[in-house]
Image (tube, helix red, strand yellow):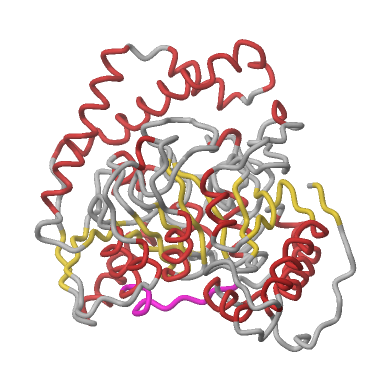
Amino acid sequence: MGVETTNARTTRHDMVDLTCFTLRAGAAGIREGRFTSEELANAYFARIQRYDRKIHAWAWIDHVRALARAGEADLARRKGSTVGPLHGMPIAVKDVIHTAGIPTGMGSAIFDNFVPAHSGACVDNLVVAGAYVQGKTITTEFATRHPGPTTNPWNTQFSPGGSSSGSAAAVAAGFTSAALGTQTVGSIVRPAAYCGIVGYKPSLGLISRFGVHPVSQTLDQVGVLTRTVDDAALLVASIMGSDPRDGATLIDFTPFSEIAALAERPEPPSIAVVRSPSWALADGDQRALLETNCATLARHGARMQQVELPARFAEAVGVIRTIQAAEAAANFRTMMQCDADRTSVEFRALFDRGMGIAAADYLAALDTRLVMRAELDALFCEFDAIATPPATGEPPQTIASTGSADFCAIWTLCGVPSVAIPTGLGPHGLPMGLQIVGKYLDDHSVLQTSLWCAKRLPFPFHPSL
């Protein structure tokens, strides 16, 4: 990890732990002059210096640069000007997302010295909203399966999940209030569940993927990891928008203002409880937690009804793996001709599988995906959201595996919004959670439902580092 250090100045906030603030609270504190962006940057860096030696969340971080960006934000505020809703806030960025002038290694030695000339659209939109890049968080190799050194802040013997490993760990460890991630199968929702935070993967097309190294153009999606549902809504609202460089974004969607000013839904939701075809993979503790969570929500007035998905959805994991492998093989073919020996066994296996997929099978998988999305749309005529597990249970007791993403496969395949909220602790004292899924492009509703559920399923945020 490249770390530039400076002595953190003593401030009038020595008795207040600024690292405990949510994204909204931090932005409000800076805007209202209760503390400065520079003071917040120093507080985060002090915590990073103390704990990241065992968490390994960062691929690159430069405190001198962060202080310069924070100082610019503070100067603008003193002159009576704030840039946007995230003015002065540091945001962590997954290391597959391009950042101009900042290394973007993508979890691979092949890109050790790669410094992009331009930023991803989501990063540019962060700057427009007043935020700055705090640092780059560790990703699995090319956002696929081979993990980096990141550990779970709740217990460093366990996986933080992947591929947004560093982003999830950084938020959970209190190194930042929010981070950007990406998801191709389960790379936001699963690490959020494992690390006891909120992970929000919006509907495909709400956030531009320009400047994100592609794995699968059909499946790749940008999302966020935060401490609260309303923080996730604010961050996504700040980076959403149409972009002609990513045709998936040229759609009609919920107005930004409704998502940014997220309010709890006025009445209890109607929720379909979906075990999914992957139910056999869930351990006993995850199954029990789902039942307990649903019973609690029902006591608070939610209409909870168990629903079986159509038989076609049993194909979802195979379909998503076919699309992912075929498109990854096409996207990485040139690189693999030169540098295959510098990739992991796991990545070579993905590439080789993709190269062996027949065009007819790939096209059939794409057709099946569209049929499944239509069938999901029909389900939402009766329900506000779906409740389902985000993972098989607690994270694996190893950092050599990021765990199974099967409980995320259907929702990512269909491009629908999903939110992971932490709801309990497993037998090893590690987080477990609930996944709330919504209708395609109805992100405002699924966020409202997630906020309603989260308030009735309280969870302690900070692990004991």
Name the residue at the front extreme: 79
Name the residue at the right extreme: 7
Q: Main secondary structure of the magenta part?
A: loop
Query: Residue shown at 79%/69% (left/top)?
Result: 46
In percent of width and height, residue 208 lies at: 44, 43
Say which quadrant the C terminus sits in.
bottom right
**Res. 130 image quadrant:** bottom right
Please state if 33 lies on the left or on the right of 300 as rendered.
Answer: right
In percent of width and height, residue 445 lies at: 26, 64
Q: Is residue 454 magenta?
A: yes
Please state if 444 lies on the left or on the right of 51 as rendered.
Answer: left
Above or below 261: residue 110? above
Q: Give the magenta part as a residue range.
A: 453-462
In percent of width and height, residue 337 lies at: 61, 10
Q: Is residue 335 magenta?
A: no
Q: Nearer the viewer, residue 401 or 38?
A: 38
